[in-house]
Image (cartoon, grey):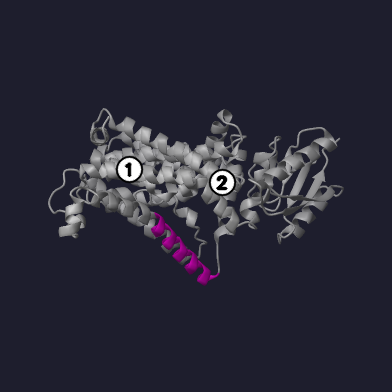
Amino acid sequence: MSFNRFRAWLVASAVRPEARLWLVIQLAILHAVLWTFILINLKAAQDVHMDVAEAWGWGQKFLWGYGKHPPLSGWVAGLWFKVFPAADWATYALAMAIVGIGMVICWLLSLRVVDARRAFLVVVMVALYPIFNFKGFKYNPDLLQLVTLPLLVLAYLNAFEKRSWQSGIWFGLAGALALMTKYWVLTMIGAIGLAALIHPDRLKFLLSPAPWVAIATMVVAMIPHIVWLAEVHFVPLTYAGDTYSLEDSRLVHQLVAGYALHNVALLALPVVLAALAMAWVPPWRKLLLRTPSRIITRAWARGANPGVNVSQARNVWIIQIIVAVGPPLGALVFSIYMKTDWGISLFFLVPLALVAIPALRVQSATLFNIVAIWLVLSVATLAASPWIAAREMAANAGNAAIYGARSELARELTQAWHTRFGSRWAVVAGTMEQIQPLVFYSPDHPSALLPLEAWDSGLTSRDDVKTYGFIGVFDPTDGRLPAFEKWVSETAPNAERIVMTTRRFTHGKAGPSMSWNIYIAPPAK
């Protein structure tokens, strides 16, 4: 197949009803596979992130909640790792599988708002958005929202269009699924509610059964989780209040500014690359020599645009503006610690919001250009990933938070337990950041106990500690060490106390040395 014929085939496949879904699925699969290998190379000298290890631990027991969060991310991890081993590569494959599914849903969502040509441009812009590649390396509730929130918006647009009780049921179920991912999705649910109230066609929607059936369905679907919340005395709210409440207003302002700049920078990449793809449409060379401004202005024109459903585009614009502005303002008003990761799930609509501007004209050649840009950047990143990883390790050689040898510690502790007791190591106690990787990497996969926190996962208990024994692991430089040692003294006064030191070598390069206070309490006789 010649180059021109391939380009024509790609553009035709992107818009033909019988071919376009399969093309998008192929794109998502290729994206997921490429970036899985990229992440494997980039993270070769690192252990998996503690959030990933935590989700793996949750997935070992299907509960209606896990201390800090609703259960869906744990359930998904549990199902995934019933098929795949507890290995680093499998966690990156899971993250990219989530990203790939999110891409397909974003495309389906886009078809409710724009024509197939624009929808394909949107999905490739989403693939270029760093949240869907570099930043998507760690599977956790934030990343899983890249599936559940696009699904929620898709269900809303469907209900807004059809206004039937059946569409209301799907909308309600999508809302419940999103809430079972993370309570943060209340920001998106609130934005959708405001969009329904602000939209010019609000009365048509509000007087239909769809929104009311959706609310009832969501409440009913959430009952098991609400019961769990009551049983644990609403401990996730305690976690949120204790962890993210701030009194330093200056720090709050700095965090909000950092959050805004961080997300603007991430969004700039797909927007700039899409603009380049539009400018790179023939006869761009002639225009560059004669009237350079036409390279930009030719993509804009007044008048009606049959490629945009303006009514649904209004919904997208309203929702995106609210979720972009609302959380930072809320953080300023209520003095909340604003994490940059909270923006992971809130800006996937930006490509669609821009492409849905009626005055924007998208030529067919743009589709091939944007795919070419995505492919070249992805393949180049794959080729450069070992070099990037080596440079990163050289620049951060002493950073134990990134390169600390926790997987080695997990194996050494497992061996120490087996040598002493000849049984499975069942419980590890400490702080989340220190012990979750041990849960993942130990061949025994012990359950994590967080004795200094009120929001334990529920996977084990204080009674299990007395029955099965435990290994306590603590960073000697952590200011919470006295409190942990007090707990150990009260729980297992005869626990053996030792110090272990670990270090990892990657391609002959030494990582940082880390020392750990270890407390080994035997099982009951």
> Is residue 503 highlighted in magenta?
no
- Sequence-earlier tag: 2 or 1: 2
326 vs 390: above or below: below
260 vs 181: above or below: below
Q: Amino acid at mark 1?
A: Ala
The residue indicated by pointer 1 is: 372
Q: Position of residue 235 (x, y in %)?
A: 60, 50
Q: Tell me which corner region of the image, top left, top right, bottom left or bottom right, holds residue 151.
A: top left
Q: Nearer the viewer, residue 259 or 195?
A: 259
Which structural element holds mark 2? loop
Q: Nearer the viewer, residue 382 or 419?
A: 382
Q: Nearer the viewer, residue 444 or 494?
A: 444
Q: Amino acid at mark 2?
A: Lys
**Quadrant location of the C terminus?**
top right
Question: Residue, x 62% and y 45% (percent of image)?
Answer: 47
Q: Is residue 458 left or right of residue 189?
A: right
Specify start and end residues of the magenta stretch as a single range. 248-266
